[in-house]
């Protein structure tokens, strides 16, 4: 009814009079940041890196790195106490390109002649050092092993080469699916379970080295072959797709998968790189999403935290924050852990020699991965200061972590309301030009209020037990 009854009008008048008489409740202070540990956003699967293209062999000592230094680098990568505690290892599935240290051994060296012929697989138990590295990672507690193929074998492709793009010939779809499953079975034989399996890397880009093109439709068509093949194999592995070179470009692949029930059933994790620009949108899916490869531009080694180059430590810290918040990513996988020369990796190995150097890019990633463990959840943060980039997490063991990146050139003081518990003795660690996850007395608590003094152009990690 559009007309109010006389009784309703009287009641509303009484309520209005009462509201006028009662004092209004105090308004919440919008300028005071708050962190709500009671509420869960996306779960975090982990942080990781790759040592594909025989970089694992370099770490093993192919250019002179000795056992003691090798252990130090392994500790830096995997130790939860001494290093970054990285929890995802990305493996490269065989390619026979001839570039020095940019090739991986293949498990299918010879063309069987036709798609339905029985292939003659070979296995050396080494896989460019990746088997050794995977076993080391497992000993440190790593549980996610993510194997990805840059290309199918040459004879399965339209261009007859593993390099320079080309497409998978439709007649070879089942043979290629069998090939990928066999790779995972070889690792299973070595005691390593491939938990995440991918069939393409940057299908939207043609590289001079190992690469293969897929349109979104072609990716969907192959998933409808690969999915049943993996299920029939008995392997306990989930499929990932599609590792597009750009996070924005991955959206088209994600939408194609979501629109096809069979492909959607096959995929457990959506994966995308972000070379074409920063993460600007979440992927249109309810599946877990990984930022599965990135390193900043600039073909040069850089050990600085904040030099304005765009490939320093602060750049990586800001990218992690952005990817986890704007992209709602469940994992962050940096491109490469350690390599030689003008590498964009985290660590540079001597070439040759028994030594290594550590970049501030490494410490930026380690400040997240050491404290935010697999199974953690991101929690909501309200923040009115645009100079502060803040993310917060709750681990499965109850530890709560706040990551605060002060992008201002001046020191900042901030107060945070903690919802969902407090801590009388919080720990804080600072990473900047002179410090690398260095303990610092810069935070204190009073009740549910945490006060922090934030160094300029620095990442402050706060841990609450």
Image (cartoon, rainbow, N blue to C red):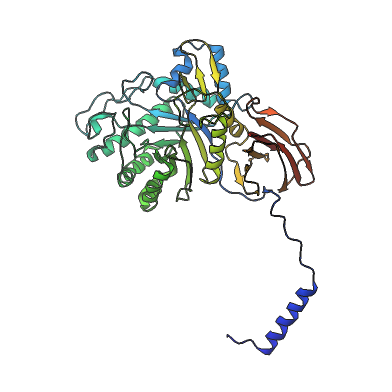
Residue 18 location in percent, x, y? 77, 76
- Residue at point 70% right, 36% down? 411
Front residue of 92/366: it is: 366
Asked where in the image residue 230 lies, by quadrant, the reply is top left
Asked where in the image residue 125 lies, by quadrant, the reply is top left
Q: Residue furthest left?
A: 113
Residue 437 location in percent, x, y? 65, 28
Front residue of 415/374: it is: 415
Residue 185 location in percent, x, y? 39, 30
Q: Quadrant of the N terminus?
A: bottom right
Above or below for 9 versus 219: below
Q: Residue furthest bottom?
A: 6
Asked where in the image residue 113 lies, by quadrant, the reply is top left
Say whether residue 148 is left or right of residue 39.
left
**Looking at the image, can residue 117 be seen?**
yes
Residue 270 location in percent, x, y? 44, 43
Q: In which quarter of the image is the C terminus?
A: top right
**Label tally:** 0
- Residue at point 25% right, 33% down? 156
Say whether residue 421 is left or right of residue 211.
right
**Looking at the image, can residue 465 be seen?**
no
């Amino acid at each position: 009814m559009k007309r109010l009854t006389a009784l309703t009008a009287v009641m509303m008048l009484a309520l209005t009079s009462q509201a006028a008489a009662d004092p209004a409740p105090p308004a919440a202070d919008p300028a005071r940041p708050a962190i709500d540990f009671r509420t869960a956003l996306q779960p975090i699967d982990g942080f990781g890196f790759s040592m594909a293209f025989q970089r694992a062999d370099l770490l093993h000592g192919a250019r002179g790195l000795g056992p003691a230094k090798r252990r130090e680098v392994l500790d830096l990568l995997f130790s939860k106490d001494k290093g970054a505690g990285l929890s995802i290892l990305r493996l490269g599935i065989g390619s026979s390109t001839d570039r020095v240290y940019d090739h991986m051994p293949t498990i299918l060296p010879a063309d069987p002649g036709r798609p339905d012929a029985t292939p003659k697989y070979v296995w050396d138990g080494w896989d460019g050092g990746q088997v050794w590295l995977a076993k080391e990672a497992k000993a440190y507690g790593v549980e996610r092993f993510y194997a990805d193929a840059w290309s199918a074998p040459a004879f399965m492709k339209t261009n007859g080469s593993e390099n320079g793009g080309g497409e998978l010939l439709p007649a070879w779809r089942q043979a290629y699916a069998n090939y990928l499953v066999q790779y995972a079975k070889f690792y299973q034989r070595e005691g390593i379970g491939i938990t995440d399996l991918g069939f393409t890397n940057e299908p939207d880009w043609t590289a001079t080295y190992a690469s293969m093109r897929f349109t979104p439709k072609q990716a969907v068509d192959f998933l409808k072959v690969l999915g049943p093949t993996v299920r029939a194999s008995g392997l306990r592995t989930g499929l990932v797709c599609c590792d597009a070179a750009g996070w924005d470009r991955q959206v088209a692949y994600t939408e194609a998968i979501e629109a096809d029930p069979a492909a959607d059933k096959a995929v457990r994790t959506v994966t995308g790189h972000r070379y074409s620009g920063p993460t600007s949108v979440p992927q249109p899916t309810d599946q877990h999403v990984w930022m599965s490869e990135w390193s900043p531009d600039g073909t040069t080694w850089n050990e600085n935290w904040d030099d304005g180059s765009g490939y320093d430590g602060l750049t990586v810290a800001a990218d992690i924050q952005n990817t986890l918040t704007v992209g709602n990513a469940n994992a962050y996988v940096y491109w490469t852990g350690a390599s030689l020369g003008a590498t964009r990796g985290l660590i540079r190995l001597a070439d040759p020699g028994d030594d290594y150097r550590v970049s501030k890019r490494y410490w930026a990633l380690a400040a997240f991965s050491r404290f935010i463990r697999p199974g953690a959840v991101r929690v909501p943060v309200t923040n009115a200061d645009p100079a502060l980039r803040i993310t917060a997490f709750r681990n499965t063991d109850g530890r709560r972590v706040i990551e605060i990146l002060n992008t201002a050139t001046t020191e900042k003081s901030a107060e945070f309301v903690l919802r969902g518990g407090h801590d009388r003795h919080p720990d804080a660690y600072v990473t900047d030009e002179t410090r690398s996850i260095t303990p610092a007395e810069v935070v204190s608590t009073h009740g549910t209020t945490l006060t922090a003094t934030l160094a300029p152009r620095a990442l402050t990690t706060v841990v609450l037990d």
